[in-house]
Structures are given as structure tokens and as C-alpha cells.
Amino acid sequence: MKSRQCLIVDDSESSVILLQEYLSRLPFFMPPQVCGTVADAMILLQQQYFDLIFLDINLPDHIGLDLLRSFPKPLPVIVTSAHTEYAVDSFDLNVKDYLLKPFTFNRFTRALNRALGVQVTPNSLAEENFIFLKVGHSMQRFDYNTIDYIQAFGTYCKVYVAQKVIVVNEIISQLENLLPRQRFLRIHKSYLINLSKINSYTYRHAVIGVAKIPLGAAYRERFEDFLSLFDKKTAL
């Protein structure tokens, strides 16, 4: 997983500091480059590639949207502005999101998720076929097809992978939101399972390998609905 490089185009010191601080909380983001004018941004964009651009509207030399109109390549841009009146024009120019200042960290991460096509939190980054999760002080990759099931463990979770147990720095409700719902299902308040790893099941539990995972009453109907979908796909 490569680190992502961002460019901040903003002449407000407080706005730049906030964006830098938000990015520092997340995995796989290099310290962003910063410039305060459209002219400086044009020079940087001609010299290197950026995975994402945070663009203010009111800049000293031009309106920020002039950058989008003048640069020949499509730019992955999140507009950051204290003004709502530029939102329609921004989306007409295919920006990924429009953040109205001041914005919270949660709103910021939603914009990142939309712009980059990932799910990112301070302890994880989820892509199409794998997820990076924080284990202690490092980030570890988990391919979805290797995960058997996940068990809540207080403010952490135990991830069961090929008869190994790895404790990750994430709560189960957050993992439920991050993992692809067509592959992983919550079947108990303390368990999240990989549907493709089920060997058998009864009214009270699902079996994965030698483990019997309890099936909570509140989750039973949804579990059975998912399994019926699998049966229909098999029949087809």
C-alpha cells in the first residue's frame, strides 16, 4: 500500500493547520504539500502527481475554481470553503466533495472516503479486497478471503485468520461498517463472520472450522435472509 500525497491550496494558515492535523491522524498519508495561490499550484501540478487536492475558493490571485478550468487533466479535488455559493459550480466541474468551513474530522473522513473510493479511519484503511488495521503501533494488512471471523474484545477486536488470533485496535461496530457487507455479517453482538467460511449452521450457532459462533436472536432473521440469497445464487 503506497502512501498518498495530498496538495493543500489555501492561503489561510488556520485552515492549512487543521487539514495537516486531520491528515496526520490517518494511515498512509504523507505530510501534504502546501501552496497559497493558483499560480503556485499550477507549477506543482505540472511537476508531480497528487492523489488528492484540497482547494480553497478565495485565493489571492484567482478564484480556486480557475485552477480546475485551466488544468488539462482531471483533478481529484475536495473544495474547502467558507462560502456556499460556489458549491453548484464546483460540482459542475466534477469535484469529489465540498467541505464547508469549519468542518469536523468525521465530515473530513467522509469526504476522503468519497474522493478516494476507500474507507479510512485513524485505525484502518479498507480497499476492495483487503483492509489495513492497526495492530499495536503498526498497520497490518488482512486480505478479506483469509479472515474467518472477528470477536469483540472490549475496545479492541480479535481477528481469527488461519487458526491465528490477532488483536486489532478497532471496535466491532466500526469493523462492521468498514468490511464489505456482501462478505461479512454480524450474527451476534460480539461476532462478525466471513460468510464464505461457514461450514454449517443451526438455529443457535454457525460453524467455521472447529469454532462454533453463537447466533444471537436479534441477528437470526438477517442471517437466514443472507443465506437464502446464497442459495438462490447457487441455484442460478
Image (spheres, rainbow, N blue to C red):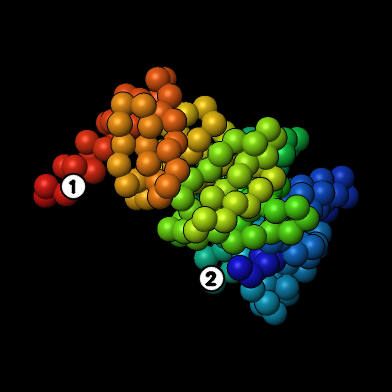
| Residue matched to label 2 | 73
Q: Nearer the viewer, mark 2 or mark 1?
A: 1
Could you tell whether 37 is left or right of 108 in the image? right
First reached walking from the N terminus: tag 2 or tag 1: 2
Against 102, residue 56 (above or below) is below
Task: Reply above or below: 93 against 48.
Answer: above
- Mark 1: few, some, or many residues within 10 Å (few <14, many ≥20)? few
| Amino acid type of the residue that numbered disc 1 sits on in the rendered structure | Lys
Percent position (x, y) of residue 118?
54, 53
Disc 1: which residue: 233
Q: Nearer the viewer, residue 91 or 157?
A: 157
Question: Which one is nearer the viewer's eye here, 27 or 223?
Answer: 223
Which residue is painted at 53% across and 70% down in the image?
73
Q: Taking the image as drawn, is residue 98 in sight?
A: no
Mark number, residue 26: none
Q: Residue 105 at x, y = what percent?
A: 72, 39
Q: Is residue 139 left or right of residue 93?
A: right
Badge 1 marks a residue whose secondary structure is helix
Q: Position of residue 214 (x, y in %)?
A: 44, 30
Q: Name the side, left or right, on which 224 lies relative to 190.
A: left
